[in-house]
Image (cartoon, helix red, strand yellow):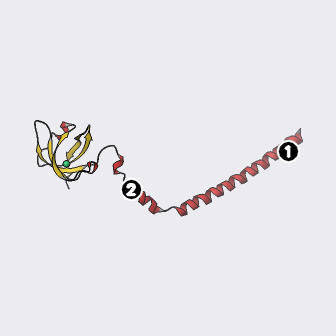
Amino acid sequence: MSISTTSAARVQRSRHAAWQLGALAALGLALIWSQAQATTHDPSGHAGHGAAPTAQAGASAPFSEGEITRRDARTGKFTIRHGEIANLDMPPMTMVFALQDSAQGSALQAGDKVRFQVEKVNGALLITHIEAAPAH
Ligand SMILES: [Cu+2]
């Protein structure tokens, strides 16, 4: 009984030693692997990712710039001389826009420089956000 217990303990010890060796070997491999990763890592790859266009990824349209030339008090529509509207592929021009939220335009008037988001909603162009352009 005592012999078998001792031999069992020896087996356990040797197994433990084998496990330690295995763990060390694995650790060594992990270190070699991580060093290989570190040396093959190209910092310029990250710069490339940063330069990738991600502005269109959001749900909302990009800001366009323009100047209000007329505000129709009755309809709440704005005539805006706008720059290029990238998301609509629209070149600069002067045109009339309706506002989704008329309260947003209440403080704006003709002559104001604005930046705004315009989207096609149910087939009609709609300003979904408008604000005074930030001063330069
Ligand atoms: Cu236009």
Query: How far apart in space, not on screen, are marks 2 and 1 (Cα)?
Result: 65 Å
In the rendered image, the quadrant that contains the C terminus is: bottom left
| Side of 30 where 83 appears, left or right | left
Residue type beneath disc 1:
Ser
Q: Is residue 89 or residue 49 the one in the foreground?
A: 89
Residue 80 % position (x, y): 15, 47
Q: Which residue, given by chain and number where applicable, does mark 2 sit on?
A: 52
**Label 2 CA crowd tier, 10 Å (few <14, some 14–19, many 20+):** few
- Mark 1, secondary structure of its residue: helix
Residue at 88% x, 40% y is 2
Q: Is residue 55 or residue 92 the one in the foreground?
A: 92
Q: Which residue, given by chain and number where applicable, does mark 1 sit on?
A: 7
Q: Is residue 98 or residue 3 the one in the foreground?
A: 98
Q: Mark 2 or mark 1, which is nearer to you? A: 2
Q: Is residue 77 or residue 5 the one in the foreground?
A: 77
Q: How many labels, in total? A: 2
Residue 39 % position (x, y): 54, 63
Residue at 71% x, 53% y is 22
